[in-house]
């Protein structure tokens, strides 16, 4: 009888040691899961920051292009002003040349009249030779005047031609620059739309996750899955080393039953209340957070009392121990 009592004491001690190891592994898994969630959140924040930097870079590029466009527009305005001045000068030169031609024509007519008058009064023999000489000189004067007019007109055209070429190049460049600006605005609009869509989707997914974690059913199922992962990481196999949702008495259904050597069993109930703890994470002040944590401690204590009242050791005989593991509730 004493040997049997010592054997039971050794089994209880082994169960406590196993429970301690499982609790340590569960704490490690819990910390790893928390760190993974923090890393994922930091990665998403970094991606959003990168998109914001790219958006700011695109805005600066557009502002630089707008400044260059204004510079080109000012140059084009100056070129147009210079062309207008050159055309005005050309028109003025043409008016002056027309006036000179009219004056020359009038002078020629006056000379012709004078020569005719002189011819009637002068020697009849020299009349024809004098008129021919006068006409020759007038023709030479007209030819020189026309040549001078042509040279001045050519000079004005030489001045205007580079301006027209520059204006054509500026207009072509402005058209190309306008196309690039429209393309950049389209890309910027598309990226902003994609960023807004990603932000909305992230908010929806975050809200769905928070809503799901507030549901006791979802948290309970998540706790069962995490419990199974923990024992499988410990090297246990389902239906050989442990079983889930085993029920021998109606109304009592533990989350897991671990098979130990010597036909011993370890009953695991993994559910625990977390509503107050989740509320503490959303608290806006330190006082509210501490109040929610106190409520959480009370809920856990009350849950442990309820767990002890289930008397799993009486349901699973012989040599049944009870282990409460907090995963979800």
Image (cartoon, rainbow, N blue to C red):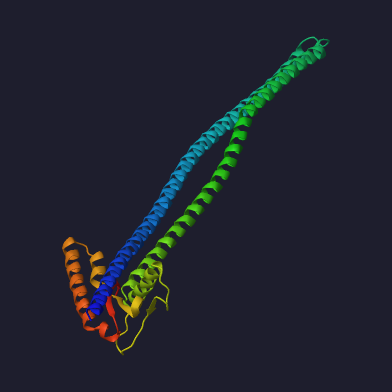
Count all numbered tags in the image, as a single digit.
0
**Extreme residue in the bottom direction:** 250
Q: In which quadrant is the C terminus drawn?
A: bottom left
Q: Residue at x 37, y 65 (%)?
A: 203
Taking depth in this image into account, of 307 and 58 the one nearest to the observer is 307
Taking depth in this image into account, of 157 and 27 the one nearest to the observer is 27
Say whether residue 30 is left or right of residue 76: left
Tell me residue 73's x, y (percent). Answer: 51, 39
Q: Residue at x 25, y 64 (%)?
A: 281
Say whether residue 309 is left or right of residue 190: left
Taking depth in this image into account, of 145 and 236 the one nearest to the observer is 236
Q: In which quadrant is the N terminus drawn?
A: bottom left
Q: Is residue 78 visible?
A: yes
Q: Is residue 302 above or below residue 205?
A: below
Tell me residue 200's x, y (percent). Answer: 40, 64
Where, by quadrant of the figure, is residue 95 drawn?
top right
Taking depth in this image into account, of 231 and 164 the one nearest to the observer is 231
**Extreme residue in the right direction:** 125
Where, by quadrant of the figure, is residue 272 drawn?
bottom left
Where, by quadrant of the figure, is residue 211 drawn?
bottom left
Tell me residue 216's x, y (percent). Answer: 31, 77
Q: Residue at x 77, y 10 (%)?
A: 122
Q: Is residue 102 visible?
A: no
Tell me residue 202's x, y (percent). Answer: 40, 63
Q: Is residue 103 above or below residue 121?
A: below
């Amino acid at each position: 009888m004493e040997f049997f009592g010592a054997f039971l004491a050794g089994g209880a001690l082994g169960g406590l040691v196993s429970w301690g190891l499982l609790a340590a592994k569960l704490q490690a898994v819990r910390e790893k899961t928390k760190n993974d969630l923090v890393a994922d959140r930091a990665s998403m924040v970094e991606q959003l920051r990168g998109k914001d930097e790219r958006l700011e870079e695109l805005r600066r590029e557009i502002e630089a292009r707008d400044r260059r466009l204004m510079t080109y527009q000012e140059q084009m305005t100056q070129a147009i002003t210079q062309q207008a001045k050159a055309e005005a000068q050309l028109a003025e030169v043409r008016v002056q040349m027309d006036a000179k031609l009219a004056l020359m024509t009038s002078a020629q007519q006056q000379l012709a009249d004078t020569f005719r008058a002189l011819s009637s009064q002068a020697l009849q023999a020299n009349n024809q030779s004098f008129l021919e000489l006068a006409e020759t000189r007038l023709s030479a004067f007209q030819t020189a005047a026309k040549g001078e007019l042509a040279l001045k007109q050519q000079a004005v055209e030489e001045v205007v031609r580079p301006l027209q070429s520059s204006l054509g190049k500026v207009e072509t460049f402005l058209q190309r620059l306008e196309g690039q600006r429209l393309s950049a605005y389209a890309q910027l609009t598309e990226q902003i739309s994609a960023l807004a869509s990603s932000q909305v989707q992230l908010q929806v997914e975050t809200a769905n996750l928070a809503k799901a974690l507030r549901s006791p059913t979802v948290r309970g199922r998540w706790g069962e899955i995490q419990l199974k992962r923990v024992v499988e990481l410990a090297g246990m196999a389902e239906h050989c080393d442990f079983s889930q949702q085993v029920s021998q008495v109606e109304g009592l259904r533990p989350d897991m039953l671990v098979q130990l050597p010597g036909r011993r069993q370890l009953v695991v109930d993994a559910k625990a209340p977390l509503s107050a703890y989740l509320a503490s994470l959303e608290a806006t002040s330190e006082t509210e957070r501490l109040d929610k944590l106190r409520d959480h401690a009370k809920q856990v204590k009350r849950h442990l009392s309820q767990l002890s009242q289930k008397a799993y050791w009486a349901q699973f005989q012989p040599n049944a121990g009870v282990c409460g593991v907090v995963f979800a509730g």
